[in-house]
């Protein structure tokens, strides 16, 4: 059951697609308070054993209790434990205990969730705006509430199947020869690869929808050359438009008044990568249509995917901020003995980026309604990605495009996926990646992943091996690193055999992973689930955060500690342990329910197949274009007849609901013993 409560005059964020009537009942569960300043505050007294799920891309654990979260899309490259805001803002939580209730605060401004930070048993929700909508969802369980919520907000973005291949990125591969060498090194070392990313340096002067003729003299020809190698090129698009006379995007944006405005009606100015820029008003439908149409410049060159960046929006500084800092320095009394004044001066200079004051100084025209940016801040990156997605419906109406974003809000999940921003080459960020995936799924973001190996700092060989061993299960599997850091392409970290073998496992798993992703998208379900969602009566499983269910058949328990040679794993039921050393090298062990120590070398990937479930595997390949799905090996843990439906389509078209897309596998008694059959493909059975 879903109830809706409206406060003030909220803008339509587009997060919810179902028409829910306003409730006339008093709000249950939340205690509504208006503070002395007239702001709303909602409280809930939690029980000691309540778990709080949700918040999507947020810090710390799967259970959000004990910390405070400020959902306010923020450019935050140092994702340390003290950070309250990340790149996404996903205002959905699920309280799971004696009762199960979901809460979605639909508000484009900052919303604070104090989940036992001030007082351990007290939940406080504090919208920074007086205009918002609250949805209360009652259900039988946390999992039931998530599925209701997913129906409320609409079907998740569906990526093309090739986007499940391994993808290599760096800031930056600056010219076509460097890209060729990256591809050559992968192919010569038999390391599978499907995509190479172009960061900001592929552009002419960091100008959106341009390509440097010096670095890429014949871009369409080069795109085709890479496609012939089985490689897609994925260019970045940033939110800021360079202020430069004669630059088409700038001239048109000014002409049609498509940029965000200051109070005096002039175009807002901030400095980002191109220097001085304007921000397109993505909350205006005409501006979205205009900006989205520009992606055609690159799709016409053969591009099939994009990543949208810097769209919180990130600002290095503004003229106003610089002027304030300069004037303060001019009038500063350097003879003072007050050290606090010096810290204040230094903070003004170092705090020029992403100032709250600057976010309060420009405005959007939401189709006739003028709204100050900070009141809709979290909708900006979402609507940039919406602009691209809606344009693709016209540019290539029958073809799926890869599209994902750094900043996001619930609702954007219908238009694209996300990556979790500028993480670091830290073991703690591998663990954070693991814990974040189910939370993102709860909020509708199924096509997601982190920068494998870490974006900042210097990656080590063992960290990348362990991160890839988890990353082979994430829909977006991209190795991405920053300028100035150690090169972390697999072939740059020593012997390549172990990397090749781990990635071969990914390609043998793609049919299963893609199938479970598609079924989750089409059925408003989850790809990654906490153990508690499958085993709600198991108190031990309820508190495990570093093991995940992946689809209907398998559980994973990644190793995420430096120098660890294995780890303890809890099995909520009898399971079959499969230790992969490569796609073809495996060993098996039947394990009983309970706690087990599982050895796992650096070049090994353990996974667990559930009782009476099966895992289909195909032959590995160097890219998804060369995947052979004419034969499968079925690994099954059963002594009885079981069935499995695998979703398999052409991976590109949008004919999602065709019954012909389902491949049926069955294990049945044949001539006195169990054997595997399929209606579409040849199968080999490995039965345990």
Image (spheres, helix red, strand yellow):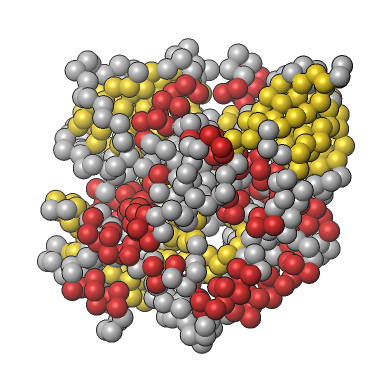
- Residue 304: percent from left, percent from top: 50, 62
**Which residue is pictured at 42% across the width and 80% down the height?**
205
496 left or right, relative to 7: right
- Residue 546: percent from left, percent from top: 65, 34
Is residue 12 among the parts visible in the rendering? yes
Query: Where is 30 relative to 115, above or below?
Result: above
Between residue 426 and residue 189, name the one nearer to us.
189
Tell me which corner region of the image, top left, top right, bottom left or bottom right, holds residue 647: top right
573 left or right, relative to 581: left
- Residue 507: percent from left, percent from top: 71, 50
Where the N terminus falls, by quadrant? Answer: top left
Between residue 341 and residue 615, name the one nearer to us.
615
Query: Where is 486 relative to 668, above or below?
Result: below
Q: Which residue ends up furthest to the bottom in the rendered image?
A: 214
**Which residue is pictured at 84% across the width and 46% down the height?**
584
Between residue 618 and residue 308, name the one nearer to us.
618
**Which residue is pictured at 30% across the width and 74% down the height?**
249
Number of numbered markers:
0
């Amino acid at each position: 059951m879903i109830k809706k409560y409206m406060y003030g005059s909220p803008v339509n964020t587009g997060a919810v697609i179902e028409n829910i009537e306003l409730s006339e009942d008093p709000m249950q569960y939340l205690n509504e308070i208006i503070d002395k300043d007239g702001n709303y505050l909602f409280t809930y007294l939690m029980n000691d054993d309540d778990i709080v799920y949700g918040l999507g891309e947020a810090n710390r654990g799967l259970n959000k209790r004990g910390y405070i979260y400020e959902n306010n899309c923020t450019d935050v490259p140092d994702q340390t434990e003290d950070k309250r805001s990340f790149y996404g803002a996903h205002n959905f939580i699920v309280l799971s205990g004696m009762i199960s209730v979901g809460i979605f605060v639909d508000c484009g401004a900052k919303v604070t969730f104090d989940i036992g930070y001030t007082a351990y048993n007290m939940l406080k929700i504090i919208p920074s705006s007086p205009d918002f909508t609250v949805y209360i969802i009652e259900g039988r369980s946390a999992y039931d509430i998530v599925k209701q919520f997913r129906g409320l907000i609409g079907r998740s973005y569906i990526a093309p199947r090739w986007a499940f291949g391994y993808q290599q990125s760096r800031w930056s591969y600056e010219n076509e020869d460097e890209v060729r060498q990256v591809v050559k090194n992968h192919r010569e070392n038999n390391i599978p690869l499907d995509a190479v990313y172009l960061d900001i340096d592929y552009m002419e002067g960091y100008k959106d929808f341009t390509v440097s003729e010096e670095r890429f003299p014949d871009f369409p020809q080069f795109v085709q050359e890479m496609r012939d190698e089985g490689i897609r090129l994925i260019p970045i698009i940033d939110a800021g438009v360079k202020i430069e006379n004669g630059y088409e995007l700038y001239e048109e944006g000014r002409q049609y008044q498509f940029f965000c405005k200051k109070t005096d009606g002039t175009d807002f100015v901030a400095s980002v990568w191109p220097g001085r820029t304007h921000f397109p008003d993505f909350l205006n439908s005409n501006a979205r249509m205009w900006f989205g149409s520009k992606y055609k410049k690159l799709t016409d060159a053969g591009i099939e995917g994009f990543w949208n960046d810097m769209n919180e929006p990130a600002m290095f500084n503004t003229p106003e901020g610089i002027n304030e800092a300069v004037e303060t320095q001019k009038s500063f009394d350097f003879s003072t003995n007050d050290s606090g004044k010096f810290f204040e001066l230094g903070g003004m200079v170092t705090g020029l980026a992403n100032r709250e004051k600057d976010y309060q100084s420009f405005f959007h025209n939401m189709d006739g309604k003028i709204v100050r940016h900070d009141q809709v801040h979290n909708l900006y990156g979402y609507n940039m990605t919406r602009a691209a997605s809606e344009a693709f419906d016209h540019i290539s109406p029958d073809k799926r495009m890869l599209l994902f974003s750094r900043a996001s809000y619930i609702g954007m999940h219908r238009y694209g996926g996300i990556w979790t921003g500028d993480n670091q080459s830290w073991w703690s960020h591998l663990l954070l990646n693991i814990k974040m995936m189910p939370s993102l799924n709860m909020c509708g973001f199924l096509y997601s992943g982190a920068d494998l190996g870490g974006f900042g700092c210097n990656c080590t060989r063992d960290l990348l091996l362990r991160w890839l061993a988890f990353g082979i299960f994430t829909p977006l599997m991209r190795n991405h690193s920053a300028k100035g850091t150690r090169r972390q392409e697999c072939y740059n970290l020593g012997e390549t055999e172990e990397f090749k073998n781990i990635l071969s496992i990914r390609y043998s798993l793609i049919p299963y992973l893609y199938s479970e992703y598609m079924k989750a998208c089409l059925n408003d379900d989850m790809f990654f689930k906490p153990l508690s969602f499958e085993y709600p009566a198991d108190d031990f499983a309820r508190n495990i955060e570093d093991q995940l269910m992946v689809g209907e058949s398998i559980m994973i328990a990644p190793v995420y500690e430096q120098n660890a040679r294995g780890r303890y794993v809890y099995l909520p039921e009898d399971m079959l342990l499969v230790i992969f050393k490569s796609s073809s090298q495996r060993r098996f062990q039947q394990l009983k329910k309970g706690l087990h120590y599982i050895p796992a070398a650096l070049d090994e990937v353990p996974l667990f197949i559930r009782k009476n479930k099966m895992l289909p595997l195909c032959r590995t390949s160097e890219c998804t274009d060369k995947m052979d799905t004419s034969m499968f090996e079925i690994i099954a843990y059963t002594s009885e007849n079981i069935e499995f439906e695998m979703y398999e389509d052409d991976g590109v078209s949008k004919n999602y609901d065709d019954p012909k897309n389902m491949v049926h596998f069955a294990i049945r008694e044949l001539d006195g013993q169990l054997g595997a059959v399929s209606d579409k493909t040849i199968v080999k059975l490995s039965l345990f």
